[in-house]
Image (cartoon, grey):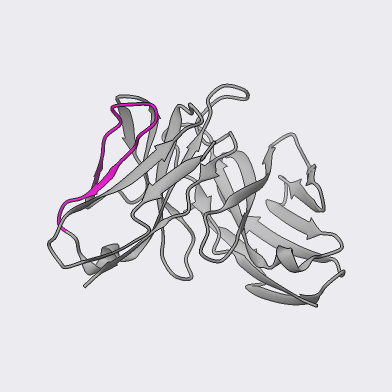
């Protein structure tokens, strides 16, 4: 069964600090992995998309890494801001057949001033 | 551009009632999707469409129907509402081309419709 596990479930950090969120998956065969940011009461917003051949991708202060061998990804947030407070969701899609992505439950990040 | 718009924002239904959740995008995207998000759970794909007139089932299609008569609109129909359909529903769209293939492009989500079935 395809699964995506995210850790930690929640995280509280001080403004200006860095943090790293983790995503482990068992989806196979692997097609791509995406990270989304979801503000409370809003739809998810895409941060990064990585395919098998990509092991890092940045979007401003957000940097995602992918290790396809160990089936792990991380999202690193640099110099956090209050507006980074949100849920961060990891999504993994498999190749072939119908499109059915597997979403993680998300990591809830709170940035305190 | 308004992006992806959804109506209504919030709705309360009685068991057995029916309703249509509306979704419109103005980005000329070929691909459109419907997801549901239950509290504390990951989003799940209900249906998707790769173009007008073409729809396909996702992971949790039971109890729902869709149609795609135009590029812009992708309504989701609930025929006999059940408490298990209480959820937040998100519509999304993405362009075709580039690396190609469904799910390999940036998806743009709408603001969601909160549905409560009592």
Residue drawn at x 74%, y 47% is: A66
Going by the image, does B1 lie left or right of B51?
Answer: right
Residue drawn at x 87%, y 63% is: A79
Residue that lies at the very extreme toward the front in this rendered image:
B1
Quadrant location of the N terminus of chain B? top right
Quarter of image, res B106: top right
A20 or A55, nearer to the observer: A20
Question: Where residue A72 appears, x then y in whole percent?
Answer: 70, 54
Residue drawn at x 56%, y 53% is: A44
The reply to whether residue A11 is visible in this rendering is yes
Going by the image, does A49 lie left or right of A81?
Answer: left
Question: Where residue A53 appears, x then y in whole percent?
Answer: 74, 34
B99 or B69, nearer to the observer: B69
Quadrant location of the C terminus of chain B? bottom left
Quarter of image, res A54: top right
Question: Where residue B44 appears, x then y in whole percent?
Answer: 42, 53
A21 or A78, nearer to the observer: A78
Is residue A93 in the magenta section? no
The reply to whether residue A28 is visible in this rendering is no
- Magenta-drawn segment: B65-80
Tell me how many marks there are. 0
Dominant SS in magenta = loop
Going by the image, does A94 lie left or right of B13?
Answer: right
Is residue B78 in the magenta section? yes
A32 over B37 or under it: above or below: above
A60 over B28 or under it: above or below: below
Residue that lies at the very extreme toward the left in this rendered image:
B16
Question: Where residue B80 appears, x then y in whole percent?
Answer: 15, 57
Residue drawn at x 48%, y 37% is: B93
């Amino acid at each position: 069964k395809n699964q995506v596990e995210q850790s930690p479930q929640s995280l509280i950090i001080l403004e200006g600090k860095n943090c790293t969120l983790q995503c482990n998956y068992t989806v196979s065969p692997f097609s791509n992995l995406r990270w989304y940011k979801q503000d409370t009461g809003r739809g998810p917003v895409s941060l990064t998309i990585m395919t098998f051949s990509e092991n890092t991708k940045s979007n401003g202060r957000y940097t995602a890494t992918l290790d396809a061998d160990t089936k792990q990804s991380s999202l690193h947030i640099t110099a956090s801001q209050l507006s980074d407070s949100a849920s961060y969701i990891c999504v993994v899609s498999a190749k072939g057949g119908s499109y059915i992505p597997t979403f993680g439950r998300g990591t809830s990040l709170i940035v305190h001033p | 551009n308004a992006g992806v718009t959804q109506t209504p924002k919030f709705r309360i239904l009685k068991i057995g009632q029916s309703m249509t959740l509306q979704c419109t995008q103005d980005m000329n995207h070929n691909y459109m999707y419907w997801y549901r998000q239950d509290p504390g759970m990951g989003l799940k794909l209900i249906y998707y469409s790769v173009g007008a007139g073409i729809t396909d089932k996702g992971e949790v299609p039971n109890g729902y129907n869709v149609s795609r008569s135009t590029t812009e609109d992708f309504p989701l129909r609930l025929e006999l509402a059940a408490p298990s359909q209480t959820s937040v529903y998100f519509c999304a769209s993405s362009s075709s081309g580039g690396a190609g293939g469904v799910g390999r492009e940036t998806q743009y989500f709408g603001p969601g419709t909160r549905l409560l079935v009592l």
